[in-house]
Amino acid sequence: MSLPVAVQVYSVRDDAKADLRATLEKIRDMGYDGVEFAGLYGNSPADIKAMLDEIGLTAVSAHVPFADLRRDAKGVIADYVTLGCKWIAVPYLDKEDRPGSGDFDKTIADIEAIGKEAKAQGIQLLYHNHDFEFVKVGQEYALDILYSSISADYLQTELDTCWVKVGGEDPAQYIMKYANRSPLVHLKDFKGSKSENMYGLIGKSDKAETSSTFELRPVGFGVQEWPSILEASEKAGAQWVIVEQDSATMGKTPLESIKMARDYLKILGY
C-alpha cells in the first residue's frame, strides 16, 4: 500500500497569503493529494472547500491553536466540518500549558473536552508533538501521559517525526507504539543537533535561529530514515502522511522545498 501524501500549507504560508488558489494549484501540480491547514488566509471555510473541490485536493486536516479551541470549541470545530476536514490537531502548547511549567492536568482535561466536542461533530482530534513532551514526569514521558490519560476515542496522534527524533526517540518505533492510533504522520527532516533557539524556525520564539547547529530540511535531504518511517506508518494504520517544513533552507524557496520533498517521496513509491 502506498499512502496518500499531503502538505501542511504553513510550509508555504507567505505564498498562500499572497494567493491561496494559485498556491494550492502549484501544490496539486507537484503531485500532492491533499493539504493540511494552519489558518485560512482570510477565506471562509466554505470558499476554501469549493476551491479545493475545483482544484482537486483533499482538505485532510487542520492545525488549530489550543487557545482558540479552549475559547470556542463548538464554533471553531464547526468551521472545519464545513471545510471538510476529518481531523483537527492541537498543534502546540505554550509554556504555561506544558508539563513542568504549569497545570498540565488542566491541559489534559481541556484537550479531552475538546476531543469530545470534536467527536460529537464527526471530527477526530489529534495532538501534534514537539520535543518538549519528551520530558519525564515521574517515569513516563509527558506525551505518553497525555495519550494514556485520554481515550483514543477522543484523542489520537499526529506524530511529528522530526521532533520525535530531536526528543531522543526513534520515529519508526514511536509510530508503531501508537499503532491504530496514528491516522496522520508528519514527515519532517532536519540536520544538526538540538539548539536553544531552534523554535525560531517555526515562529515560536522571540529569537531567530541564526546558528548552524540545527536546520530544517526537505524530506529526504536530512538525517531521517524515511523507508523505515514510511513502512511503520503503513503498518500502524496511517491514512495519510503529511510533509511539513516550517522554514526553508539550502538556498531554496518554500515552494521549491516542498517540491523536493514530494519528488523524493515519489522515488520511494509514494
Image: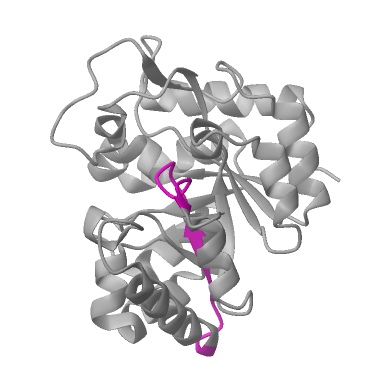
Residue 20 lies, with reference to residue 190, above or below; the image says below
Pick whichever, 39 or 187, lies toward us: 187
x 66%, y 51%: residue? 240
x 44%, y 76%: residue? 82
Whole-percent x and y of residue 186? 56, 44
Pick whichever, 131 or 6, lies toward us: 131
Whole-percent x and y of residue 217? 47, 21
Q: Which residue lies furthest to the bottom in this view?
A: 120
Whole-percent x and y of residue 141? 52, 53
Q: Which image quadrant is residue 74 in?
A: bottom left
Whole-percent x and y of residue 104? 35, 67
x 63%, y 23%: residue? 263
Is residue 57 something that shows in the picture? no
For residue 163: magenta? no
| Labels in figure, total | 0
Q: Give left or right: position of 233 versus 27.
A: right
Pick whichever, 254 or 52, lies toward us: 254
Q: Give left or right: position of 127 versus 31.
A: left
For residue 124: magenta? yes
Q: The C terminus appears in which quarter of the rendering? A: top right
x 56%, y 78%: residue? 154
The stretch of residues the image draws in magenta is: 120-136
Q: Which image quadrant is residue 58 in?
A: bottom right
Residue 139 lies, with reference to residue 118, above or below; the image says above
